[in-house]
């Protein structure tokens, strides 16, 4: 199963229109507020820290470059060619590798695992943006990628994020400037129910090694200057 053409086109148009500078996209917060916090939760559970790291849904590569400062081999993967253009332009030294891949496709995960072996996976805010039919295949393929030695760190918006986003979108002044393109390009955040995530995880044969709540930090602010944070949950996963 692969992503729908509508879904791929929506992301491609979003990234074509997105400004190139870091922080211009709603979720593109600096790594000190995102991946840096996540690694502190992830690293105690790594069975093999030296494995390659795959950043699934890497977008413009902000978090990928941060990971590449800390691990010997990091691969950023996204379905959008335009997103990867941004990522490569921001990484002229080629610190990380970036590839356009659909990891909801089983053959893609198989080929990637054949090339890299077991990997550690970092995935932030991807599942809730997937088309419903791609959510279970994505978790199944994460299980394939991590194999026996790898671990996955998954961060997803919780149900409680949706009313926050809808409130922002429907404000009398209109949605904040960095949130408006998310809706105008047909992207629908916070569409996964909280109780569905453990079901996807279990069906993939993955075990939850650790979990918790941590706000997903955005780059946008309310009119009074408060940074917008969205309720989210994080999971560390490994095979049974």
Image (cartoon, rainbow, N blue to C red):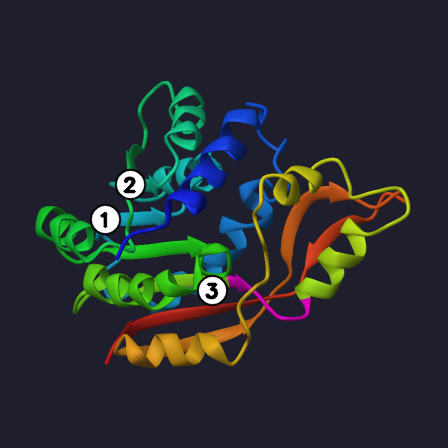
Task: Point out which mark residue 68 bears.
Answer: none
Q: Is residue 17 visible?
A: yes
Residue 120, percent from left and from top: 28, 57
Question: Which one is in front, 32 or 114?
Answer: 114
**What x and y, as percent, mark residue 229?**
70, 55
Task: For marks 2 and 1, give the one nearer the viewer.
Answer: 2
Compare marks 1 and 3 and give the one earlier in the sequence.
Answer: 3
* Segment tinted magenta in the rendering: 156-160
Name which residue lies at 41% across and 55% down: 123
**Residue that badge 1 annotates:** 52
Note whether 141 is above or below 217 in the view shown: below
Tag 1 and tag 3, C-beta contact below 8 Å: no
Mark 2 or mark 1: whose residue is earlier in sequence: 1
Does dot 3 land on a helix, a strand or a loop? helix
Q: Tell me the crowding category of disc 2: few under 14, some 14 to 19, or many 20 or more residues within 10 angstroms, Cα based.
A: many
Taking the magenta stretch, the answer to whether it contains residue 46 is no
Q: Which element is circle 2 on? A: strand
Examine the residues drawn in magenta and state their main secondary structure: loop
Viewer-closest of 88 and 50 = 88
Vertical order, 105 against 158 (above or below): above
Whichever of callouts 3 and 2 sits on the residue coming sooner in the sequence is 3
Question: Would residue 30 be found to the left or right of residue 137 on screen?
Answer: right
Cα–Cα span, label 3 and label 2: 20 Å
Label 3 or label 2, whichever lies nearer to me, is 2
Question: Which residue corresponds to mark 2?
Answer: 75
Dot 2 and dot 1 residues touching (CB under 8 Å): yes
Picture quarter with the N terminus: bottom left
**In this rendering, position of residue 18 left or right of residue 114:** right
Rounded to the nearest angstrom, the CA distance separating label 2 from label 1 is 8 Å
Furthest-left residue in this view: 114
Answer whether residue 157 is magenta in the image.
Answer: yes
Residue ID for mark 3: 41
């Amino acid at each position: 199963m692969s992503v729908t053409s509508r879904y791929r086109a929506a992301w491609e148009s979003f990234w074509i229109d997105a400004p190139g500078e870091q922080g211009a996209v709603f979720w593109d917060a600096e790594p000190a507020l995102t991946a840096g916090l996540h690694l502190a939760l992830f690293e105690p559970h790594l069975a093999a820290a030296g494995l390659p790291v795959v950043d699934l849904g890497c977008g413009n590569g902000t978090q990928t470059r941060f990971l590449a400062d800390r691990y010997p081999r990091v691969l950023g993967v996204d379905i959008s060619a335009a997103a990867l253009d941004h990522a490569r332009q921001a990484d002229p030294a080629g610190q990380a590798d970036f590839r356009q891949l659909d990891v909801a496709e089983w053959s893609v995960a198989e080929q990637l695992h054949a090339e890299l072996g077991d990997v550690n996976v970092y995935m932030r805010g991807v599942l809730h943006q997937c088309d419903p039919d791609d959510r279970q295949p994505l978790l199944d393929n994460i299980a394939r990628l991590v194999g026996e030695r790898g671990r996955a760190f998954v961060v997803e918006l919780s149900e409680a994020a949706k009313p926050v986003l809808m409130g922002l979108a429907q404000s009398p002044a209109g949605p904040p400037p960095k949130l408006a393109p998310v809706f105008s390009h047909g992207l629908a955040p916070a569409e996964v129910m909280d109780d569905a995530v453990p079901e996807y995880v279990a069906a993939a044969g993955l075990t939850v090694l650790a979990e918790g709540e941590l706000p997903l930090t955005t780059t946008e602010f309310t009119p009074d200057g408060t940074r917008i944070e969205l309720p989210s949950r994080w999971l560390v996963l490994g095979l049974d």
